[in-house]
Amino acid sequence: MTGMIAPSILSADFKCLEKQLRGLEDAGIKKIHIDVMDGVFVPNLSIGFPVISAIRSCSDMEFDVHFMIENPERFIKNAVLAGANSITIHQEACRHLQRTIQEIKENRCHAGVALNPATSLETLRYVLQDVDQILLMTVNPGFGGQKFISGMMQKIRECKRFLQAAGCSALIGVDGGITMENAAECIQYGATILVAGSSIFQGNIQENIKQFQKIVG
Ligand code: DX5
Ligand code: ZN
């Protein structure tokens, strides 16, 4: 079983973010997930570029920025300048998906595309060769702490088959409601990046990471 945990800092304690990030690094975390929301695509606001720049100056971890914003092409440069290593945009929020993916890559970032629970995998068929990561939303985006939508397990499996059939090596990430109880199954079904917010930051962070790492290998 090989997967990777990418903590979503949406659930971090912002009063001591630097300390929490150091704690993640000490526990062996290589990649964090940063949720950027616009209050339009999703009914919430979250972290913006000044915060990303600030934490870039005190962390060497990979920054995977999840854009939950309409017309994400407007903000690619901002994310790159703030220190993003990869940018994931939503298929549903993007009119010229292929162009936007190209733009991300021209900025030397990895490009990801996220799909809401109700969006078909088929919508990605003609961009598969350009994408580094597919992020399957396993909750409706906008908030941490929601429950994993059980039907999404099947979608992970179908995504794996879809990519194999297309000869595509993009990674599969899952985001929302990931816990120690469902992590192993997500990996078995084909996910390799597990984004987890509340199940990492609630309680003892170091201990949670240790337990997750035992499960995902
Ligand atoms: C939800 C965000 C997630 C969120 C996950 O819209 O995209 O990254 O932080 O939080 P948990 O793991 O608590 O569901
Ligand atoms: Zn996210």
Image (cartoon, rainbow, N blue to C red):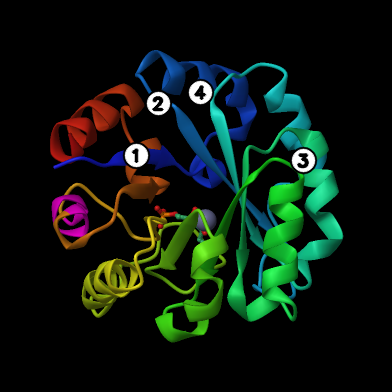
The quadrant of the rendering that contains the N terminus is top left
Q: CA distance from mark 4 to mark 1?
A: 16 Å
Going from N to C along the chain, the mark reached first, 2 or 4, is 4
Which one is earlier in the sequence, the residue at label 3 or at label 4? 4
- From the image, tell me which residue sits under label 2: 29
First of labels 1, 3 by sequence position: 1
Marks 2/4: CA–CA distance: 12 Å
Q: Is mark 3 within 8 Å of ligand 2?
A: no
Residue 210 located within the stretch drawn in magenta? no
Residue 117 visible to an observer of this rendering: yes
Q: Are marks 1 and 2 in contact (CB under 8 Å)?
A: yes
Q: Does the magenta segment cover residue 183? A: yes
Say the numbered circle drawn on residue 5.
1
Mark 2 burial class by Cα count in 10 Å: few <14, some 14-19, many 20+: some
* Percent x, y of residue 26: 40, 13
To which residue does mark 4 refer? 20
- Most common SS among magenta residues: helix
Q: Residue 210's image quarter? A: top left
Q: Where residue 80 is drawn, which disc sits there?
A: 3
Question: Mark 1 or mark 3: which is in front?
Answer: 3
